[in-house]
Image (tube, rainbow, N blue to C red):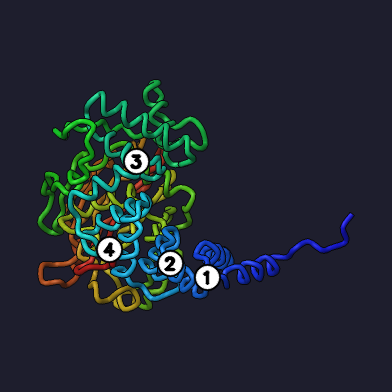
Amino acid sequence: MSNEPNPTPDDALASLRAEAASADPAKIYALATALVARMAMEEAFPLFIQAAAAGHNRARIEAARMLLYGVGTASNPGQGVRLLEEAETAGNVIAAYLLAMISVGNQAVKRDARINQRLLLAVNAGYAPALTTAAIHFGRRNDEQDQVLCMDLLRQAAGVGDPVAAQLLAARMQAAAGDDQASASDSLPACSVRPFALGLVRERLALEETWQQPPVKRLSDRPKLGAIDNLLSADECRLLMAAARPRLSHSHTLDPQSGAKSFNAIRTSQDASFDPLQEDLALRLVQARMATAAGVELVFAEPLIVLRYAPGEQYHPHRDYLPSAALADNRPQAGDRAGTICAYLNDVEAGGETVFPAAGLTIAPTAGSAIAFANLLPEGSPDPDSLHAGLPVERGEKWLATLWIRQGPYRDF
């Protein structure tokens, strides 16, 4: 029996450092990856850059991600995009997928027909996030063959370990069996949205339909308020609920004087905010659909918020525009919250209506539908008539997705 001690993590890291000294890009990449695992991002970044310069595709992708999100280095989306384009040219499908994801914002990467081509490359390579994205896309169509294709893609994504695809597949199978009510603790809430007749070519990716402006029914001029029917499909609603559920925490409010976050009895829900690092193409496409309905590009939107209200929970009357202190700390160059769009994600058994007292309107939540309203007057000053509230849920639960829309671009891509 050997008396030699087992190698420690520090020993392993020292060994990787010694191997990386050979300038082998694979060794350098391995060292950088080990440093990331230790959260030593600033030390890892130049190593990824070094390996990327030597042609290491996975290093290009990791360096690009760090540049896109400002992790371990200053944010530089342009340089990140160039690294991804190099990896894509070298045949890396994950780079193609990421470029498609970035192009949703139509800023750092121009949005054109390549978004479909890039997604298709990743789908054909069996990349799980791409499979799920394509499944949700085809699932919007009211066509039997597209619905079969959606199920096949969800099965493939679930088979390669995508947990969200597994939940979407289970929900579809449950609905097909005639049991669309949540029966198990890990089931998604009921969502009765049906596929839409989009008039698209079957079995052809056409993500550009995401940016088709949907009909908006004007409900009020003060506040400016509109309703959008059938904005999101059942799969899109379930995607948001499934992605948010593991991240839910008690909702907070902003102090009107200090702008500080705090817990307040006026808001008793749970919510999940999606940091850009947590987004994938499917999530960005749903947000882009919501932003389009509000009349803007996705880059004008703050991070997505998904909320869950249990029985008795509510949001007392409030306004969405920001206190001056909060605005000063949260990308003031983007301006205030000009508008809000809220999409209802499930079938609420009773209660949970949205009320606008100044307009005398009470809106019942309907799965897949949305409301969009202005928080500011045309000249940019706060509109006090934008006061609104979420009434208590009486039975069941209520899921809601919210995008706050700024006056100017908020996101880098």
Inspect the image, locate mark 3, and give the three-letter code of the amino acid beneath it.
Answer: Val
Asked whether disc 2 touches disc 1, contact meaning CB atoms under 8 Å apart, the reply is: yes
Mark 3 or 1: in front is 1
Give the secondary structure at mark 4. Answer: loop
Circle 2 crowding by C-alpha within 10 Å: few under 14, some 14–19, many from 20:
some
Q: Earlier in the sequence, mark 3 or mark 2?
A: 2
Q: Secondary structure at mark 3?
A: helix
Task: Provide residue 404's location: percent of width, then percent of height.
Answer: 27, 60
Mark carried by residue 23: 1
In-front residue for pair 201/221: 201
- Tell me, for residue 413, which label it has, or none: 4
Separation of disc 2 and disc 1 at Cα?
9 Å
Question: Which amino acid, mark 1?
Answer: Ala
In the rendered image, which residue does mark 3 sit on? Answer: 123
Give the mark nearest the N terminus, 3 or 1: 1
Give the residue at x 52% y 61%.
Answer: 26
Tell me residue 360's x, y (percent): 18, 51
Mark 2 / mark 1, whichever is N-terminal: 1
Q: Is residue 181 left or right of residue 229?
A: right
Residue 245 location (% of width, % of height): 46, 47
Kindly state the secondary structure of the residue where label 1 is placed: loop
* CA separation in Å, label 4 and label 2: 27 Å
Quarter in which the N terminus is drawn: bottom right
Q: CA distance from mark 3 to mark 2?
A: 28 Å
Image depth: mark 1 or mark 4 in front: 1
Q: CA distance from mark 1 to mark 4?
A: 34 Å
Tags 1 and 4 touching, CB below 8 Å: no
Foreground: disc 3 or disc 4: 3
